[in-house]
Amino acid sequence: MNMKMKVLVVACAMAFAGQAMALSPTVVAADATAGTLVTLKISGSSALQNGVSEVSEDLCQAGTIDEFWDGTTTTASGSNFRAVACTVKTTGSVVPGLTIPSSIGGKPVLIYDTAKGGSIYGVNPVATGSAVGFVDYTTCGSASVTTNSLTHEPVWSCTGSLNTATDVGISDVEPATLEAGVNLTVVAGVPVFSALTSAQLASLTSKAVVGQVFGITVNGTAAMGSASPATTAMLNLSKSQVAAIMDGGTYDWNTVDASVPAGSSIMVICRRQSGSGSQASVNANIMGNPCSTPLNPLKYSDSSVANGTGTTSSIAAAGDVVVVENSSTGNLAHCMTYAQKGTGTSAIDLTTGAIVAQGAANSVILPASTSAAPTYAIGIVGLDHGVGSDWYQNTNLNGNVASLADASVGQYDLVVESTFNRPSSMTAGAKLDLYNTLVKEISSPAVLGGGAGQIVPGILALSENGAVSTATAATFSAANPVIRVGNSGNTCRPLQQLQ
């Protein structure tokens, strides 16, 4: 590029930065070239991806917001990589008392959000400075292809990613719990991370920002057999029943429901990979691991039927247990559906939950559930994910409903406090100001409750952060979603009444 062209690009970029205009890939590139773009790279839990998007509705000037999601040239999925670009407001936040720092007010920002790999990627790479995958906005084509149903902002589909160091991380549970052996990521038998040293853990500054509510899911058959998951009868399970299924104490749904003949069913456990905050919440809250006398969750290799390197995948049959370590919440939700409807001419990869060709290593064919050989699937999904078209519902747990209302007063306790984690060495500058502002926004009941746009699903503001609610379970308001109990950022501590 010659000098005249460089000057022109910089001039255009500076003009763009001073206007309330949408930050398309080309505008973001110009701002980056001009050195005016403030970036923040976030990795880890997927639970707050919708929250990050919704924060932009309050943090950003109207008409300036663009979102970049991973996908194909025609379809944006956002399953692994997302980013939000916008021009920050100078005033006008719905968060009481929030002052937007001058270092970011009126400036173009790009907030990356990577969920691939789960919560462990919101801890270990932050402490070690390791590279993480992020969306590459330069591969986003020339036109937005859809709109975010939550924010109603333009979404661009991006086909490429880049590997670079992350700035901050999000974990569904506090970093120390994720470093327990049961939660360190192992994929197909290969460790991805080693436990952080005490010094590396101490290098992180962590803050609990929201309460996240999880549901124990069962598929349509397990929920008493109906034509659709929306009309199935509600099932109640105790924590001890869930633990017995997930740790191999029972391989038979007959022990849960005596009307199911012993040995007649296929049991599918749709769990997450180690390193997932979802799995860590079950390990701690249901299995007591690493909190008390720990039980160990079954691994994919504990399945009684699996294919190694053969040419035809094994077919699950009555009496079998199949354990699928899903790499994402989306894969886990699909796992529940595959258990109900079968994988047809394909198979399911037990190490990732992906649907693969028959004959692939570590894969199993799930037959469609029938009265002759019903398939009962159990899993764990955050309420932020919802149900959608997948074939499952949340059970009652110990007689309590998986809902924000019951969780807000401690009646339903499968709740964790999600943390934001940054290097303690991040001590000043626009990046830190953007981080601190983002934390204040996403922890605010005003934002979570839709004060800036839409309600952020499945998430509660924390009393420990000063959020106030006088509601009961019967009078809970989604517009002011505050949990009145807490554990002070210690997942192994029982929830205590705070309000």
Image (cartoon, rainbow, N blue to C red):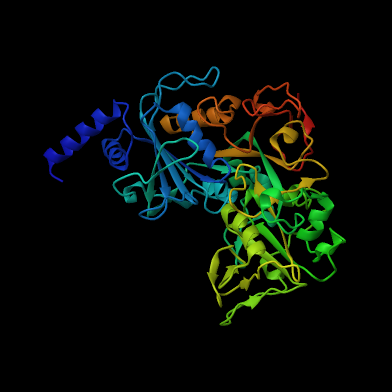
Answer above or below: position of 373 versus 50.
below
Picture coordinates of residue 438, whole percent (x, y)? 50, 31
Residue nearer the viewer, 381 or 219? 219
Answer above or below: position of 289 versus 491.
below
Q: Quadrant of residue 172?
A: top right
Q: State the residue at coordinates (29%, 25%).
A: 18
Q: State the residue at coordinates (32%, 42%).
A: 25
Answer above or below: position of 413 versus 390.
above
Residue nearer the viewer, 451 or 83? 451
Picture coordinates of residue 186, whole percent (x, y)? 61, 62
Residue 423 at least partly seen? no
Picture coordinates of residue 58, whole percent (x, y)? 47, 27
Q: State the residue at coordinates (20%, 31%).
A: 11
Picture coordinates of residue 341, whole percent (x, y)? 63, 64
Q: Hey, which residue is sitting farthest bottom in the picture?
A: 311
Q: Is residue 38 left or right of residue 395?
A: left
Residue 149 at least partly seen? yes
